[in-house]
Image (cartoon, rainbow, N blue to C red):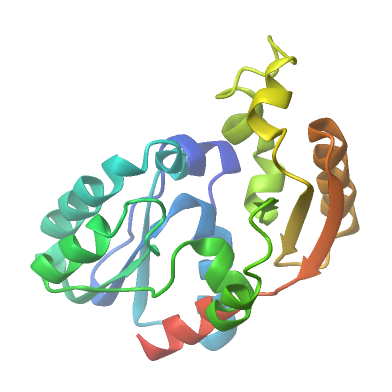
Amino acid sequence: MKLPSDSKLTEAGLAPEGRGELLLIACGALAREILALIEQNGWSHMALTCLPAILHNRPEGIPDAVEAVVHKHRDAFERIYVVYADCGTGGLLEARCKDLGVEMVPGPHCYSFFEGNADFAAHDDEITAFYLTDFLVRQFDAFVTKPLKFDKHPELKEMYFGHYEKLVYQAQTDDPALTELAKTHAETLGLTFERRFTGYGDLETALAGA
């Protein structure tokens, strides 16, 4: 499968190809990582479809969007697995998946399962940390700058980020250019910078179990 641009994954998502044994319904922010895992592990029985990543800016819409995709593709696949964590839905996505009879990735959000849910839960002192993944480093303007209007009103940064102390970049890949870009975002927000190489974390474990 040819990977669309990050901007398309943000705004439009990714349609599945063909039929098969297992359909993964994921956030567009995870497409690159999931496709890499499918290729590395030879999971040819898996197909992937992604909802627009920008849904994370209005997470109340995620359960309905997931349900619509389940109904649309259920007859074409033997099983469906939802590659979203709670992602700000307040438990609504988990309840919806139970009603639909489909499984989902465990955890509160992607920052947790990239780092490993157990390890992330141990960082209970990081309430002042702002997290970015590879995708969010690349799409910082689409998810942070423009929605929060920093490009037009830079004075708003203090309002939104005055209570944060550091930016934690959870790196899925060892890319020096992304690291430098993440450092720039930390400087933009006036936060100290920390990089953690997480790789795919519990995402690979969850997909292997699926």
Residue 185 in the image, given as x and y percentages of width and height: 80, 38
Q: Residue at x 43, y 81 (%)?
A: 207
* Residue 43 visible to an observer of this rendering: no
- What is the residue that sits farthest to the top in this orientation? 152
Q: Residue at x 61, y 73 (%)?
A: 120
Quadrant containing the C terminus is: bottom left
Residue 55 on image: x %, y %: 39, 40
Q: Is residue 204 above or below residue 68?
A: below
Foreground residue among 171 and 166 = 166
Is 44 rendered above or below residue 65? below
Q: Position of residue 109 (x, y in %)?
A: 48, 61
Q: Residue 156 vs residue 180: left or right?
A: left
Figure check: 169 above or below 162: below
Q: Position of residue 125 (x, y in %)?
A: 68, 65
Q: Is residue 195 left or right of residue 83?
A: right
Residue 9 shown left or right of residue 93 in the figure:
right
Left or right: 183 with respect to 153? right
Asked whether 99 or 119 is in front, the reply is: 119
